Amino acid sequence: MKTTRKTTSKHWMILSALIAMGGAVQTAHAADFEDFARVISVTPQMEQINVPRQDCRTEYETTQRYRQPERQAERSNGGAILGGVAGGLLGSQVGGGNGRIAAAAAGAIAGALVGDRMDNNTNSNNNYNNQSSYETRPVRQCRNVDSWETRTNGYAVTYEYHNRTYTTVMPYDPGSRLRLHVALTPRP
């Protein structure tokens, strides 16, 4: 008989524990439902944001451009010959006898040098002018400029539910009614 009493009391203990747990499980469930509240006011929440942008303009720049000559100008002997003849003629007009011959020779040499320089410097100057030119080209200049924009980052919503007033921040304007998720849980 001792074994039956122990078994029966164990059963009562297990049974009462299950009943207690069942009651605890029932009280843990909450009542959830959807309802609507009346919106009292909606205030946009504004913030200033810097959105830098580029400010560009076109300026014109003039540069000198050097070109290589297509071919080197050949030296001319014509200026030296003409200068030598002219110098010899002028020199022969000065002095007399052997002095006249020496003056003619000196005049021919000086005339040849002057004629050569004049003729070949003109050719090289023409060549120099052909080597350089000026060109104007557009150059784009840009810089970053601060650009401040005002943006809405949410809405402060004040609403009334069961004669109580609440305020929350929402990402959108809910309009005149606010849908609520209501969860009722009894206090222990």
Image: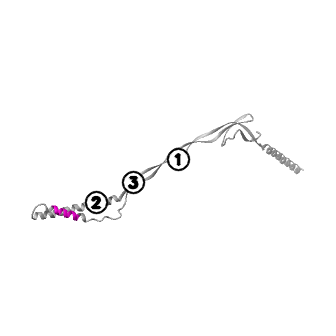
Q: Residues within 10 Å of mark 1 (few under 14, many from 20)?
A: few
Examine the structure image and report whether residue 9 is included in the region drawn in magenta.
no
In the displayed orientation, state which residue is furthest to the left.
Answer: 97
Which residue is disc 2 drawn over? Answer: 122
Circle 1 is placed at which residue position? 53
Tell me the CA gap for discs 1 and 3. Answer: 30 Å
| Residue bearing the label numbered 3 | 63
Quadrant position of residue 71: bottom left
Stretch of the chain drawn in magenta:
80-90
Left or right, residue 178 beside residue 15: left
Taken as a whole, is the magenta stretch helix, strand or loop?
Answer: helix
Quadrant position of the C terminus in the picture: top right
Q: Earlier in the sequence, mark 3 or mark 2?
A: 3
Q: Could you tell me how far apart the alpha carbons at marks 1 and 2 are, in whole angstroms?
A: 56 Å
Q: CA distance from mark 3 to mark 2?
A: 26 Å
Q: Amino acid at mark 2?
A: Thr
Locate residue 21 relative to residue 43 in the image: left or right. right
Q: Is residue 174 above or below residue 97?
A: above
Q: Residue at horizontal 64%, vertical 41%?
A: 154
- Which structural element holds mark 3? strand
Foreground: 67 or 21?
67
- Residue 20: x and y in percent read 81, 44
1 or 2: tag closer to the N-terminus: 1
